[in-house]
Amino acid sequence: MSEALDPMTAAARPGSAVAAELDDERILGTYGSGDGGPLVVCIAGIHGNEPSGVVALERVISRLRGRRPAFRGRLLAVAGNLPALRAERRFIDRDLNRGWNVRRVSEVLERPAMIEDFEQAELLRVLVPAIRAAPGEVVLLDLHTTSSTSPPFVTLSDTLETREFAAQLGLPLVLGIEEEIDALVDYLSGFGAVAVGIEAGRHDDPVSIGVHEAALWLALSAAGCLAEQPDLVDLDACRRRLAEARGDLPGLFEVIYRRAIGPVDAFRMRPGFANFTPVRAGDLVAHDVLGAVPVPMRGRLFLPLYQSQGDDGYFIVRPVRPVWLGISRVLRRLGVPKLLPLLPGVRRATRREDTLIVSRRIARWLVNEVFHLLGYRRVRETAHHVVFRGRGPLLRD
């Protein structure tokens, strides 16, 4: 279907118009009374060069206000990095989708120094009280786009509840990126929120807006906010839209490698790589100050950096057979994770019952795989130990 014929993608190219029209208000809009349903929090533009989600949220809220359908719960739409959105830059001083951990958040609230510190503090003052005051379930949707050509996909903090919700969007799931970056989605999942990131496509592709909009309608339906209402939105058309954008991409991946970069590296991706491009060990994908950059292992190139700002050159992901999700679900529900401290080389941290310390000397094989299967994420690694923490509500108090 051409852009002109598709009402979900017939929009101006995201960019300067969004930055020019965005006012000083953090809240993009709200809808619903909050009675009888979940709080759905949508965040767009946490990276200022990713305005697609802002446009999609404005469309969804405008349609809700115009049609006034029955709505269970409440929708809260929030703009992420206002100065960066106005400047059409990923960030001003630092990446706002990093540093979402308890230690860094405490520092930001006590001693903000950079522009993104103040933005992070303001987001916390908006989001945390709303989440804590919610009478029922909380769903968080963090809307993003990529610097390379990409099919849409979903990132998530890997709890069973979040998996079940994300599966209803019909997009590929990418697990494990929260171990590499301290992102907003994973931090807020610690308050008990079902939290997913929705990556819609390339930054400057108008199709990304339509993908975000379709995903938002499906997410509101999956959350139980909207019953089937054909006069409001055609949910089957939304599903077809996402299926078309996804193509034949497998449904499940895990992150196995991150190429971290810094300003002195002079890192540059070679042109022409799309997201999820298959690569082999030794393939040359970039150049830096030392010369050619080969990938260290076989997999699929993930989030190759084609923008001037960022500290992730690229990631490598590999497909995972969906049967492992079923095995993981059964083991978690049977309470097998509680038995992990009984294994040789595994002990519980002194001050945190949700944290396990694994000796590298004793536990040598498939450590990450086993702990991921049972619902733990790697939070720290040394030459002697690996520290894992259980996913789920950790921060309510």
Image (cartoon, rainbow, N blue to C red):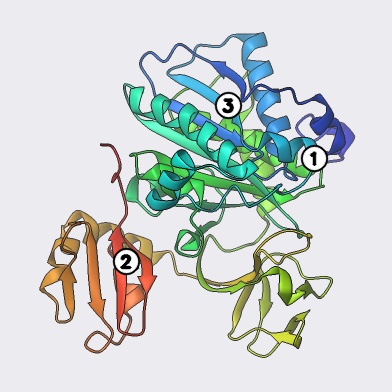
Left/right placement of residue 189 relative to residue 393 reads right
Residue 316 position within the rendered picture, expressed as x and y whole percent measured from the top left = 59, 73
Element at badge 1?
helix
Residue labelled with disc 3: 77
Labelled disc at residue 373 = 2
Mark 3 neighbour class, 10 Å CA radius: few under 14, some 14 to 19, many 20 or more: many
Rendered residue at 18%/75% (across/down): 346
Q: Could you tell me how far apart the alpha carbons at marks 3 and 2 are, in whole angstroms?
A: 33 Å
Residue 165 seen from this side: no
Q: Looking at numbered disc 1 in the image, what kind of residue is underneath it?
A: Ala
Q: Nearer the viewer, mark 3 or mark 2?
A: 3
Residue labelled with disc 1: 87
Q: Nearer the viewer, mark 1 or mark 2?
A: 1
Residue 187 position within the rendered picture, expressed as x and y whole percent measured from the top left = 42, 47
Q: Nearer the viewer, residue 265 or 250?
A: 265
Rendered residue at 81%/41% (across/down): 206
Q: Nearer the viewer, residue 281 or 79?
A: 79
Residue 374 seen from this side: yes
